[in-house]
Image (tube, rainbow, N blue to C red):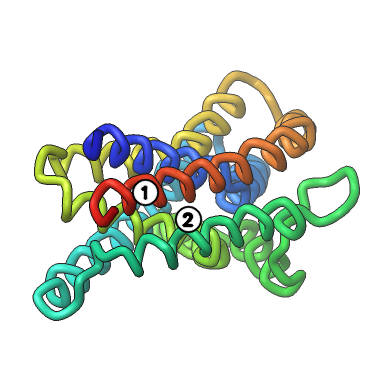
Amino acid sequence: MTVFTSVIILLLSMLITASLQLAPGTFSLFYHYALGKTTAKKTDDRSLSFILGAEIFTGLIWALLLIIFSSLCPIIDFYSSLTFWVLFGIFIAEAIAFALFYFRRGRHTALFIPRRIATELQTYSRKAKTRSDAIAVGFFANFPELIFTLPLYFISTIIILNTPALPRAPIIAFYIIFTTLPLFIIRILYRSGHNLAHITKFRVKLKPYLRIIVPIAYILLALAILNLGIINHG
C-alpha cells in the first residue's frame, strides 16, 4: 500500500507540473519569433535547445534537493508525521491559490506573474538568436512558477529517498521528460502547420479545464500524503 501511495503521489506531482502554463506560453512565443527571423529548420533546432533548458532546470532542482536531503537526513527526519501534516496544508493552500490566482481574469492566457516578468520573458524570447540563448530562456521560464512546483519536488524527493522499491534514476528521468511533454506537443503543432494564433486559441480553451483539474490534483495529492502519513505514523 505504501509503494502504491508513493507512486500515486509521484504521478500527481508530474501531472500538476506538466499542467502549468508559463513555460509552454513562453515556448510558443519563442517559436513564433524564431520563425519570423530564421528558417524552419533552424527554428526547430533552437526549439530543442529551449526544451533542453527546461529539462536542465528540472534536473538541477532534483539534484539540489537530493543533495540537500541526503546531507540533512541524518540530522532531520523528513519522513515524520509533522512533515506530512505540513505538506498536507501546503497542497490544500496550493489548490486554493491556483483556483483563485493562477490565471488572470479574462479570455486570454495571462498568468499570475507580474507584468514586468512577463514582458521580460517575451523580450528574451524575441531576442534569442543562438542555442545558448534558447537554453537560457527555457531554463529561466520555469523560475516564476517555483511557488507552485517546489513543494511538488520536495515531496517527490522525500518519496524517492524513502521508498527503496522505486528505482530513482528511471523515475527522475521520466519525471523530467513527462513535465516537458507540453513543449514537445507545441513543437509538433508548429511543425504540422499551426501558428501562434491556433496554439493560443487552444490554450484559451484548455484554461477552464486546468482551473478544475489542477486544484483537484493538488487536493488528491494532499489526501495521498495524509494517507501515507497515517500508514507510517498512525
Q: How dense is the environment of label 2, judged by Cα within 10 Å: few (below 14), some, or many (20 and up)? A: many
Task: Say what amino acid the circle numbered 1 marks.
Answer: Leu
Under circle 2, the secondary element is helix
200, above or below 93, in the image: above
Q: Position of residue 130 (x, y in %)?
A: 45, 57
Q: Position of residue 216 (x, y in %)?
A: 61, 40
Q: Which residue is mark 2?
A: 138
What residue lies at 37% left-to-right and 57% top-to-bottom?
153
Residue 101: x and y in percent read: 75, 60
Label 2 and label 1: CA atoms lie apart by: 7 Å
Q: Is residue 45 visible?
A: no
Mark 1 surroundings: few (<14), some (14-19) or many (≥20) residues within 10 A = some
Q: Are marks 2 and 1 in contact (CB under 8 Å)?
A: yes
Q: Quadrant of the N terminus?
A: top left
- Say what amino acid the circle numbered 2 marks: Gly
Of residues 92 and 155, the one drawn nearer to the viewer in this rendering: 92
Please report the residue visible at 84 percent of the width from the left and 46 percent of the height from the top. Answer: 108
Residue situated furthest bottom in the rendering: 75
Q: Which residue is mark 1?
A: 52
